[in-house]
Image (cartoon, rainbow, N blue to C red):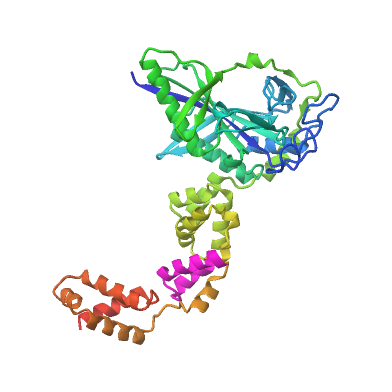
Amino acid sequence: MKYEAVIGLEVHTELKTKTKIFCGCSTAFGAEPNTHVCPVCLGLPGCLPVLNKEVVHYAIKVGLALHCDILLHNKFDRKNYYYPDLPKNFQTSQFDMPICLNGYVDIEVNGEQRRIRLTRIHMEEDAGKLVHSGATINTSESSNVDYNRTGVPLLEIVSEPDIRSGEEARAYLEKLRSVIQYLEVSDCRLEEGSMRCDANISVRPVGSDKLGTKAEIKNINSLTGVQKGIEYEAVRQARVLEEGGTIVQETRGWDEAKGVTFSQRVKEGSDDYRYFPEPDLIPLDISQEWIEEVRRELPEMPDSRKRRFVTDLTLPEYDADLLTLEKGTADYFEAAVAAGADAKLVSNWMLGDLAKLRNEGGVPIEQSPIPPGNLAELIILINKGTISGKIAKKILTEMWQSGKKAAVVVEEQGLVQISDTGALEEIITKIVAANPQSAADYKAGKKKAVGFLVGQVMKETKGRANPAAVNELLIKALEA
């Protein structure tokens, strides 16, 4: 029997506010453990929460960008469970009256457009962080708790079970991350935990409309982990059913190193959390005027920017898609084009040599030692014929290492392209004389022999000769 996967994702993203959701503690990442805490976020008796208005503002902004309905009247609830990283023994969240309902995210996988519906978006506080002595909780002899993250504001974005593969799940998560980054409400760094994903996965026979028993993979912290974890779990469940077994509703972990999921605990249902309205926070009323104010703040979204790059700048769809995936990359691209460089050439350099340098150093585009104006200058020098494309690659590396402008590197290292016909003819005469066999091969009809001679000229000039001029002059000399 052939099975299909049915997948829904719960994505938690930390909001980029300066203080926590219900107190004035800092949300800065990387502080010493248990230094960004106070009686409120530690849940000490007699301390009352106060809602951070900026959290609501950000939630409305994300909801509008994802085409959601904003509930004018919503409230907070207590989600009750015991875990060492939850000092109050309950999490302040939203249950039956969240701030956003419905909505959707459009994705494209293998040329096919898919619309993934959203169930809801709600506000809640983050829990603390368990720091294990081993690689996972199962392999650790001890665990410590850091409460700095407790009370950091979260949005939980819940999709409908519309996703059918690990590849679609990754595309959905990439698009969601892109939209949220464009809104500048979160940095969405999975490696730092500011964006985390729980995947609910079940399988069913192809053609069936009945949902199977789901397992949830918790806190996957990489795009690759999301895709591979889902793919593994779907195959595991299908194998269990094929062998006559049954799927247990449970929470599973993802072991990145082994590439497998593993059982953690039996999965709770919503009734197990004994939700009830948060008595220390009054219900939240949102005016239509506030919603319209936020709507006017919305920036150009990734899909719109991609269409503009294709239509106005005549970029290929592939280039435009990669350039608009992250706001910083799209901003850099537009700044380089505004500085006078050709759009397609900027794209080629950004997605090629510059991307290679960034990846090798793990450097975000915003921290590139080559500002967009400097990249534009390099491209303009190529177009003017001042330098060759081959030399430009060498110059780019020097610009990356030194932070110098292209023109400075060219002047310091004497890299101006040789286009003078007289100078090139002298070099070509020398090269042809030194390689009589190649010259004879060309005259005998082996036209590819000219490529070898061009290479020898480039070697002689250390890459500074104008390749087009060399090719033309060589053929002229050989056919004389």
**Residue 260: in sight, yes or no?**
yes
Residue 395 x/y as whole percent:
48, 69
Q: Is 380 part of what is drawn in magenta?
A: yes
Residue 67 versus residue 165: which sits nearer the camera?
Answer: 165
Count of numbered badges drawn on the protein: 0
Return the x and y of residue 344 as percentages of the image width and height.
46, 59
Give the magenta range. Answer: 376-402
Q: To which quarter of the image does residue 21 belong? A: top right
Q: Report the side of 20 relative to 437 (left or right).
A: right
Instruction: Give the position of the C terminus as an image quadrant.
Output: bottom left
- Measured as percent of width and height from the top left, residue 372 is found at 56, 62
* Residue farthest along the front direction in this orientation: 141
Residue at image location 45% in from the left, 71% down from the top: 383
Identify which residue, 332 or 292, lies in the foreground: 332
Task: Give the farthest residue toward the left.
Answer: 444
Left or right, 442 with reference to 161: left
Indicate the quadrant containing the N terminus: top left, top right, bottom left or bottom right: top left
190 and 278: which is toward the camera: 190
Q: Is residue 382 magenta?
A: yes
User: Would you place residue 146 above or below residue 95 in this image?
Assistant: below
Query: Is residue 398 shown above or below 227?
Result: below
The secondary structure that most of the magenta stretch takes on is helix
Q: Residue at x 67, y 33 (%)?
A: 154
Left or right of residue 111, residue 143 in this image: right
Q: Nearer the viewer, residue 136 or 309?
A: 136
**Res 207 seen here:** no
Q: Percent x, y for residue 31? A: 71, 43
Image height check: is 25 above or below 390? above
The structure residue drawn at horizontal position 69% and vertical position 24%, both measured from the top left corner, is: 94
